[in-house]
Amino acid sequence: MTATASRPGRVAKLPPRERILDAAEELFQSEGIRRVSVQAIAEKAETTKMAVYRHFETKDALVAEWLRILAADYQAAFDRAEADHPDRPREQILSLARFIADGLPALSYRGCPFINSLAELPDRAHPARQVIEQHKALQTRRLVAMCTRAGLPEPEEAAAEITFVLEGAQVSTQNGSIDRTAERLLRIVEGIIDRDRPSREASGPGAD
């Protein structure tokens, strides 16, 4: 999903639902979920508050749908990694790390939408928070599966370490505490997946 609502001449050409989602994305990213009203989203989308509620029953439903689209984008990165590197799980993992590394510059001024949203949604019953938790659980399962296919001796532990690195790099980029985060992220992830590679290759056929 791309934020197109603020581009002159394009707003009116998009279907109303897409205009609303694009406007919501831009405002939620720049101002936060709780500070943005439905009226502000309607004005940004060049529509009416009533029209917003025709497409989304509540503001919470709109937030959940925005995050669902973002989650689908991240899951698509897994799909691309698997399609671009068939039967090469090590390269699939590195492809995911590069996907995160390439997105770090944008996080330096916007932050991770999932992390930002979790901070604003303490209620675990909130539909948008449930979207995030389900997305993260699926992401972990897919990463564990990649680590398993790569022949890592403790795939769940490796997946946890990689997740800590990927998410930690995003937070560190957002708060500016660490420099060269992309470069370091890739080096650390590569170190995790290659840590026991010589012994694995000596004991049997490798995953790559």
Image: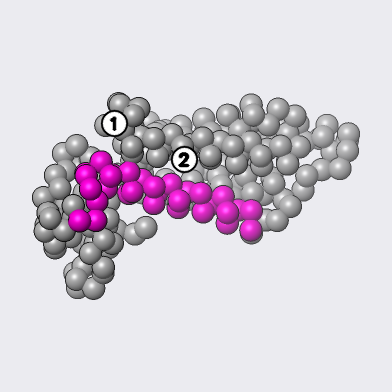
Based on the displayed image, in which of its 4 quarters is residue 28 positioned? top left
* Numbered badge on residue 121: 1
Q: Position of residue 16 (x, y in %)?
A: 23, 64
Q: From the viewer's side, name the closer residue of 78 and 15.
A: 15
Query: Label 1: few (<14), some or many (≥20) within 10 Å?
Result: some
Q: Is residue 29 visible?
A: no
Report x, y in % for residue 182. Answer: 49, 43
Which numbered circle lies on residue 102?
none
Disc sitting over residue 135 in the figure:
2
Q: In what element is the residue under mark 1? A: loop
CA–CA distance between discs 2 and 1?
A: 16 Å
| Residue type (three-letter) at the residue carrying disc 2 | His
Does residue 7 sit above or below 89 in this rendering? below
Q: Residue at x 26, y 68 (%)?
A: 15
Which residues lie in the magenta part? 54-83
Mark 2 element type:
helix
Q: Position of residue 157 (x, y in %)?
A: 64, 26
Quadrant in the rendering for residue 90 = top right
| Side of 156 where 130 appears, left or right | left
From the viewer's perspective, is residue 8 above or below residue 61?
below
Mark 2 and mark 1 lie on one chain; the one further toward the N terminus is 1
Picture layout, residue 94 above or below residue 195: below
Q: Residues within 10 Å of mark 2 (few under 14, many from 20)?
A: many
Secondary structure predominantly adopted by residues drawn in magenta? helix
Q: Where is residue 186 shown, x and y percent of the image?
A: 57, 42
Q: Is residue 15 left or right of residue 146?
A: left
Type of amino acid at the residue the image marks with label 1:
Leu
Q: Residue at x 13, y 62 (%)?
A: 47
